[in-house]
Image (spheres, helix red, strand yellow):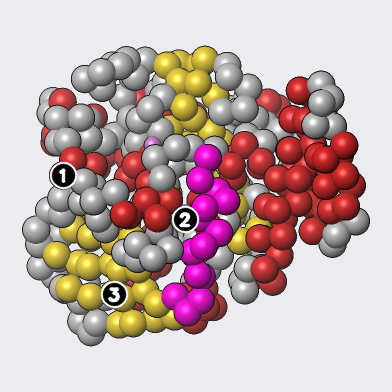
Amino acid sequence: MLIKVRPSWELRENQVTAEGDYHNRRSFLRKAAGGSLLLGAGAILSACDDGPAQARQEATAASDSVQLAAATAEDPSAHLYPVPRNLSYRIERALTAEQEATTYTNFYEFGSSKNIWKAARALPLRPWTLSIGGMVDKPLEIGVDDLLAQMPLEERLYRHRCVEAWSMTVPWSGFSLAALVKLAKPTSGARYIKFVTLNDSDVMVGQRASWYPWPYVEGLTLAEATNELAFVATGIYGKPLPKQNGAPLRLVLPWKYGFKSIKSIVSVEFTDQRPVSFWEEINRNEYGFWANVNPEVPHPRWSQASERVLGTGERVPTQLYNGYGAQVAGLYATMKDDARLFM
Ligand SMILES: Nc1nc2c(c(=O)[nH]1)N[C@H]1C(S)=C(S)[C@@H](COP(=O)(O)O)O[C@H]1N2
Ligand SMILES: [Mo]
């Protein structure tokens, strides 16, 4: 008998934010990018210097959304979006407000605060070449636009859980990491993939902090990389990925803590050696290689039992594998007593 395992995020569909919500927001942003709101926002900003903080905040938010939309409109891949949604990936939570997810980000290459999105504008997105090498049939250098043209683009709703205990739920656009592995044709000895972020301290000002082991590196086993959930994001909210979220190519691994989802990738290397990731190198007792989400395994300095929902501030219980156990628990079946799986 075939029993279909129902993923937890297929439940309580009625609680998901209506699809229209962020599309409406998009048309607002498009108008804003068109310039009609630009003067208005500027005028409010200068006019309310002594005004109530609330008005100032609203003016800042309006001016931020104009700047965010302008950056999106400039992206050379903008014409590719939106892409069709893959309805197999459903969530039981409301989507995070777009402006939250695109202005509250972790990207140490631009600084250690969450508010780096303006600094990230310095990142040049073209030319952008991905090198695929190591244990593969034939090493390959491919421009991001050629890659995008070959990959099956789709949208997926996923939950994201940062090791710092904040979480969000967002619509990513992109392609399965398995499709990239297929393109790369690893040889039979390959067991891991090492991913590397751009290293350029001229534009990535955070990389001038020389006590970090730049460039940012992450790693996965080949089995993890070809799991159906592993995704390469190239877009978000039906638009190209903003620089601060890791344009033009970033990983999304929803069952792992967010630091595994490496941004602005320039190199993918197949290897038989387990890569040492950026955070593992900094502190292996706090940030391990596996980093699977588990509410019962605390970080050495804080509990992982619950998470703060970005935007609303609500606290909700964290789930084993961030709720994606039906898809990924099998990857770790023979290792499940190893506490390091969850650090
Ligand atoms: N290159 C790089 N990738 C990175 C990071 C980073 O600092 N540099 N931060 C990670 C962390 S800790 C998280 S939680 C996610 C955050 O993704 P978001 O900012 O798009 O929400 O990106 C991950 N990828
Ligand atoms: Mo994170």
Residue in the picture at 70% in, 53% down: 67
Is residue 91 shown left or right of residue 226? right
Q: Main secondary structure of the magenta part?
A: loop
Residue 113 lies in magenta, yes or no?
A: no
Question: Upstream in the sequence, badge 3 or badge 2?
Answer: 3
Q: Which residue is mark 2?
A: 246
Q: Secondary structure at mark 2?
A: loop
Q: Position of residue 264 (x, y in %)?
A: 41, 60
Secondary structure category for the residue under label 3: strand
Q: CA distance from mark 2 to mark 1?
A: 21 Å
Residue type for callout 2: Gly
Q: Is residue 214 above or below residue 200?
A: above
Tell me if I can see residue 86 in this picture: no
Label 1, secondary structure: give it.
Answer: helix
Q: Residue 19, relative to residue 151: is it above or below?
A: above
User: What residue is drawn where x is 67% and y is 68%?
Assistant: 74
User: Mark 1 highlights which residue?
Assistant: 281
- Decide: few, some or many residues near mark 3? Use Cα within 10 Å; few <14, some 14-19, many ≥20: many
What is the magenta range?
Answer: 115-128
Looking at the picture, which amino acid does disc 1 mark? Glu
Q: Earlier in the sequence, mark 2 or mark 1?
A: 2
Question: Comparing marks 3 and 2, which lies closer to the viewer?
Answer: 2
Taking the magenta stretch, the answer to whether it contains residue 119 is yes
Cβ of disc 2 within 8 Å of ligand 1? yes
Mark 2 crowdedness (10 Å alpha carbons): few <14, some 14-19, many ≥20? many
Does the residue at mark 3 contact the one at mark 2 (Cβ under 8 Å)? no
Q: CA distance from mark 3 to mark 2?
A: 18 Å
Residue carrying label 3? 132
* Residue for point 30% across, 68% down: 267
**Residue 53 lies in what quarter of the image?**
top right
Q: Amino acid at mark 3?
A: Ile
- Which of marks 1 and 3 precedes in the sequence? 3
